[in-house]
Amino acid sequence: MRPDYKEQEANLKRIGFDIKVAKKEFLPTFTIFGQVGLNAYHLSSLFNPASQFFNAGIAPNWDLFSGGRKKAFLKFNQYRYEQALNDYQNAFLIGVKEINNSLVDYKTAVKNLDETQKRVETENKIYSLVKDKNQIGSSSNLDVLFAKEAYLLTYKENVSNKINVIISTIGLYKAAGGIDLCDIEKI
């Protein structure tokens, strides 16, 4: 579904048609001809059946002196076809490479997000414990602020990782050519 892959595929088909046309030029052309007329020496015999004639036929035509041009044109189109085939295969390999890179980025982003979510939960519990300790008088307000700061920094990192997951999902969608990958975890 990638546009560059579809473009190379269409180019390959177009050049394939050009080769068929170049091969077709080696075949002879046929001209269909016909004549209808009257052959009378006197006006009185103008419409007699003997003075009327009809002639029809098919005449093959060969270009005897343009074979070199036709061969060169065919070779040129064959070389163009080989180049288009190489470009097509290259576009396919680039697409596979981009999809693999996007998958690695996505899986790494999801793994980082899972880790930071666990750390956010842990920091939230620590912050709650420090607040409770402060209320009973066993810790200072400075400890509460340090715990809150650690919690907020971890939460900020979690938000950043969520953004990275969204960006990597969009990158994967783009690399796959716009295919809707609903169940991406199975890939």
Image: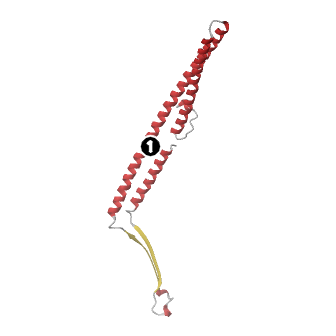
Query: Which quadrant holds residue 136?
Result: top right
Q: Residue at x 41, y 46 (%)?
A: 87
Q: Residue 153 occupies which quadrant of the picture?
A: top right
Regarding mark 1 in the picture, which secondary structure is present there? Answer: helix
Picture coordinates of residue 42 (x, y %)? 47, 93
Location of mark 1 (residue) = 91
Figure check: 40 above or below 160: below
Q: Is residue 99 left or right of residue 74?
A: right
The residue that appears at 52% across and 36% down in the rendered structure is 171
How many marks overall?
Answer: 1
- Rendering coords of residue 8 (x, y %): 46, 48
Question: Is 52 located above or below residue 22 in the figure?
Answer: below
Q: Nearer the viewer, residue 6 or 154?
A: 154
Q: Name which residue type carries label 1.
A: Ala
Asked which colour scheme the image uses, the reply is secondary structure
Residue 68, x across and y down, in percent: 32, 62
Count neighbours of disc 1 (C-alpha within 10 A) and say few if under 14, some if 14 to 19, many if 20 or more.
many
